[in-house]
Amino acid sequence: MNKTITGNIKKLTCLIAGSMLALNVQAQTTGGPDTYGYIWRDSNDPNGPAFNWVDIANAPGAVQVTGLADDNIRGPFTIGFPFHYYWYDLTTFRVGSNGYIGFSTTPVAHPFPIIPTPTGIQNYMGIMTSDLTFTDATGGAISGAECWYWTNPANDTLIVSYIEVPFWDPVAPNYIGSNSFQVILSNVDSSITYQYLTQNGVYNNPTDFCTIGIENNSGNIGLMHTHDILPPSIYAIKYYPPAATSFQVNDASTVYNNNEETGGLFLSKDGAPFVMNTQIRNTGNQTLAPFNVLGRVLNSTNQVQATSTVVSGSLVPGAVEDIIFPVQFTPTTAGTFRFVNDTQLPGDATPSNNQKTMEIQVLDTTVASIKLSFDNGTDAGLGGLGWQGGGGGAGIQFIPPFYPCNITQVSAFIAANANLAGFALMILDDDGPGGTPLTVLDSIWVDPAAVLVGAWNTVAVTNTLTINAGSFYVAWMMGADGISVGQNQLAPISNRTYEILGQASNPNAWAAYRYREIEDVMINVFIANTTIGIDENSTASFFGNFYPNPAADFVNIDYYLSENTTAISWSVTDLNGKLILNGEKDNMDAKGTIQLNVSDLSGGLYICSLKSGSSVLNKKLTILK
């Protein structure tokens, strides 16, 4: 969707779509080079590519990309060979529903930026990056709209094809037109070819509606073919890398802090220490000598609570390194904190990717009612977040500071309600693929007459819900057009916000919120302690923090044992209960870290269990391959 954010300064004015038709004329037949040396030529150029559509849907080994919806991203998928892109090699890719393939988890949605742009999505190929959709207003699949990918038997060509995919449209059935296009990655010459078989229809908004180009992993280098011009049918564009380049890049970046999304966490006051861990990467094309990596936790007034510097190893281009800082943060005071990491490479080419900031909320978990909130209660005054047409909503992922806990209330700040609509607050389990929302645990409807505007609307859950492990999601769902939920833009930001463009019970309707790096929607939840089971952050039992999660090679488990227990055992089982890994140690220190080698495990969801005395802790663990 444009999914116009109603009442927001980001709202885009819809003009007559027919004014875009004249923009389809392609006058220029070649472009570039960009800073690195890429150029492009099209099929109208005497030295350019010939249009030659490759039908892969029926090719042996072709794979259909399922789960594409509106403004979401799927993957990772294996390319089948190391594809050389700019100065680094790619081995996996993700498919964006909006007509692009990306090499990170970041989705892109309207408005679509020019290329290059250092903020927002980076490291992607914009084939026909526009507001496309695979699902209708009800969240149902649109007949004929498909996406396939195929690697040839020689393992030197990858093709990704979008077939008959329409634009999102605000008028029922909420889609219009049809577009078939593909990208071809060739390992023979490291070229990138975009082909457009059919292009019918136009998007309803004439501003930032289509971007075609390529962009590197920092967003500082890229080559745009066109912006806000739709490609014609029976047309091809080919990107050629430089035969040789003297362009040297010394660049170190922070990939994430603590978890792949640098998502915010809740900790218990006087609970277990927080282990600062981060992943860094050599995102340049030169081998990097060891350099300093600084990690620190700051409070709301920027006072340092914990700080540590670790010297990295020598990193070849593309290499990553997981770093655990020896100094830990002990949460003795309730409040808002930030875990900030910086790579400190001398002469770094891209300072904008050096730092990641993770939100930490330390809570007093001894009180009867504990509020989980990533916002500070202040609405940005932009009119709130709501989707044009009145369908969908927004959600936040919550990982409680202890287990088990009871969910007692959910709350949303309603910024506006022009049409006197109601809304629903839904709680969903994280039992979908890769920890995504799936099972609806509760749904509470708030009648229009009871809605408070410019205030928090807090409702009790229908039945007591106990969370024993993992995370859960709270969704705010619009009852009609004109209602909006509050937006909080005061840092730190949690990176836990989602936009829901369809039914909340459909995992494919959930996508990372397009502005999740700069704002949180104002949704809160209240939990309470329960006497059943163990408290992860209590010094009376033990705390188990699993990271990184998702993982690929190693998983670290931080533990905190009670004084009268010095033994700990662990196991990893699949979802069928089959034992995969296990181990046990006696005479353990009161706190420390255990590292598990999971490099031989297949990708998927597992259950990791820790046991100390009579206490047992189970957590879901995702392995990515």
Image (tube, grey):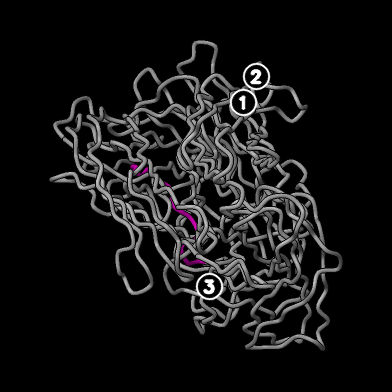
Q: Residues within 10 Å of mark 3 (few under 14, many from 20)?
A: many
Identified at 58% across, 69% down, the residue is 373
Mark 1 — residue? Answer: 55
- Residue farthest to the right, as pictured: 463
Identity of the amino acid at label 2?
A: Ala
Question: Eyeballing the image, is 462 above or below 555?
Answer: below
Which residue in the protein does label 3 denote? 375
Is residue 136 shown to the viewer in this render?
no
Q: Secondary structure at mark 3?
A: loop
Instruction: Let me know if residue 138 is in the magenta part.
Output: no
Q: Nearer the viewer, residue 186 or 557?
A: 557
Quadrant occupied by the N terminus: bottom right
Q: Name the amino acid type tagged 3.
A: Asp
The residue lying at 24 percent from left, 43 percent from top is 34
Q: Which numbered tag is attached to residue 217?
A: none
Residue at 22% across, 25% down:
243
**In front: 494, or 596?**
596
> Distance from label 1 to label 3 (Cα)?
49 Å
Q: Tell me if residue 360 comes above or below residue 66 in the rendering.
A: below
**Which mark's residue is nearer the viewer, 2 or 3?**
3
What span is in magenta? 206-217
Give the image location of residue 369, x and y in percent. 68, 73
